[in-house]
Image (spheres, rainbow, N blue to C red):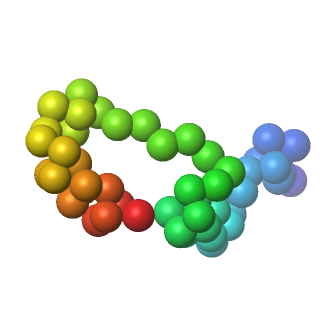
């Protein structure tokens, strides 16, 4: 028998769906930048951002 916490846990497929949606729309979440990325020149930051999104 599943506990309430287990039954409320999102499926792996749902998490993937939400991650993909956020990467495409940047909506429904919060994006953060590590200090090491923030220390990069702007052009390099843009390259990192393009690869992530």
Snapshot quadrant of residue 40: top left
Residue 24 seen = yes
Number of callouts in the render? Answer: 0
Residue 28: x and y, percent?
A: 68, 51
The residue nearer to you, when weighing 23 against 19, is 23
Residue 16 seen = no
The residue nearer to you, when weighing 2 against 27, is 27
Lateral position of residue 52 relative to residue 15, left or right? left
Please identify the quadrant where the C terminus is shown. Answer: bottom left
Lateral position of residue 40 relative to residue 19, left or right? left
Lateral position of residue 1 relative to residue 22, left or right? right
Given the current orientation, which residue lies at the most extreme front position? 42
> Residue at the spot x=81%, y=49% of the render?
8
Residue 45: x and y, percent?
A: 22, 48
Is 32 rendered above or below residue 45?
above
Lateral position of residue 34 relative to residue 3, left or right? left
Given the current orientation, which residue lies at the most extreme top position? 35
> Residue at the spot x=56%, y=41% of the render?
30
The residue nearer to you, when weighing 43 against 6, is 43
> Residue at the spot x=29%, y=65% of the render?
51
> Residue at the spot x=67%, y=66% of the render?
14
Is 39 rendered above or below residue 22?
above
């Amino acid at each position: 028998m599943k506990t309430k916490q287990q039954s409320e846990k999102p499926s792996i497929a749902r998490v993937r769906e939400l991650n993909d949606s956020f990467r495409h729309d940047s909506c429904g979440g919060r994006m953060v930048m590590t200090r090491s990325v923030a220390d990069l020149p702007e052009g390099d930051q843009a390259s990192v951002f393009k690869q992530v999104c």
